[in-house]
Image (tube, rainbow, N blue to C red):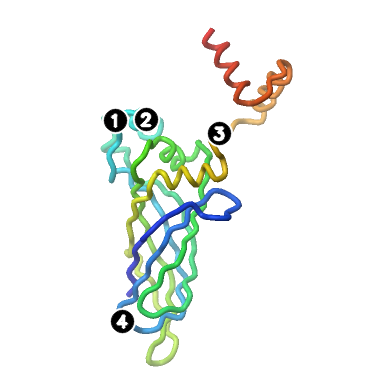
Amino acid sequence: MLRFACTGSRAEPYAAGPGLELDLQVDEGSGRKVHAVALRCQIRIDPRKRRYSAEETARLGDLFGEPSRWGETLNLLQLATVSVMLPPFTGRTTVPVSVPLTYDLDIATTKYFHGLSDGEVPLLLLFSGTMFYAGDAGVQVGLVSWNEEAEHRLPVAVWRATMDEHFPGSTWIRVRRETVDALAAYRSARTITSWDDTIEQLLEEARG
C-alpha cells in the first residue's frame, strides 16, 4: 500500500511555458522493493478551504457569483491531470511532479489564481496507477488505491513567481482575430507605440 504527501512546491525551472513543480513523497510501509510505479495524478483546487478578503470576493464574483451563493458554487476546480513514472525505491522516495499552467483568463483556475491577493491555494491531489514490486514469486503487479490522496497549501506567491517568469509584469487575455485586427488598425492609424497605450486611449475615449 502506497501513501502520498506533497511536501513542497516552486516555479518549475527551465520550463518552456509556465508550470509548477511539486515534491511528491511516496511511502511504501512493508519494506519490499518497488521496481516502478506508473502513477496518474489529478490535481484540483478546493476553494472552500480558505478565507477571502473583501477585495478577493469582489474579483471572484465572475467565477462564483454573489457571496450569498458561495455555499453552492464553491466547488472543486480541476487544475491538471499529469502522469509520473516513479523509479525503483524501497521504503520512501520523493519525486518532482511537473504541473503545466496557463495564463488564459478564460480558464476557471486562472481566474481563481488571478483573483487572490496572497495567502495559499488549497490543492487536493488524487492518485491512481499501477505498481510493480518484488514478491515471493518475482515481480508482482498491484493497483494504486483510487482513494489515495494528498493535500498541499500552494503559496499564491509561487503561482505569481511562475507567471512572472514568463509574463513579467503583465497578464494575458484571449480575443477574436477580428478584435485584434480592429485594435491593430486603430493603433496604426494613431501611431500608438504599444498595446497598453492603445487600450488606455480607448478607455479614455469611452470615459470621455
Could you say whether the residue bearing mark 4 is in a helix, strand or loop?
A: loop
Pointer 1 and pointer 2: residues touching (CB < 8 Å)?
yes
Q: Earlier in the sequence, mark 4 or mark 1?
A: 4
Residue 173: mark = 3
Q: Are marks 4 and 3 in contact (CB under 8 Å)?
A: no
Q: Give the labeled residue for mark 2.
A: 61
Front position in the image: 159 or 139:
159
From mark 1 to mark 3, how far is it between C-alphas? 25 Å
Q: Distance of mark 1 from mark 2, alpha carbons? A: 7 Å
- Of the residues tagged 4 and 2, which is closer to the observer? 4
Q: Quadrant of the C terminus?
A: top right
Q: Earlier in the sequence, mark 4 or mark 2?
A: 4
Q: Residue at x 42, y 62 (%)?
A: 23
Name the disc covering residue 67, or none: 1
* Residue 144 higher or lower than 99, as above or below: below
Name the residue nearer the viewer: 121 or 62. 121
Dot 3 amino acid type: Ile
The answer to whether 129 appears left or right of 173 in the picture is: left
Q: Earlier in the sequence, mark 3 or mark 2?
A: 2
* Residue that mark 4 sits on: 30
Which of the marked residues, 1 or 3, is nearer the chain's N terminus?
Answer: 1
Residue 121 lies, in percent from the top left, at 36, 46
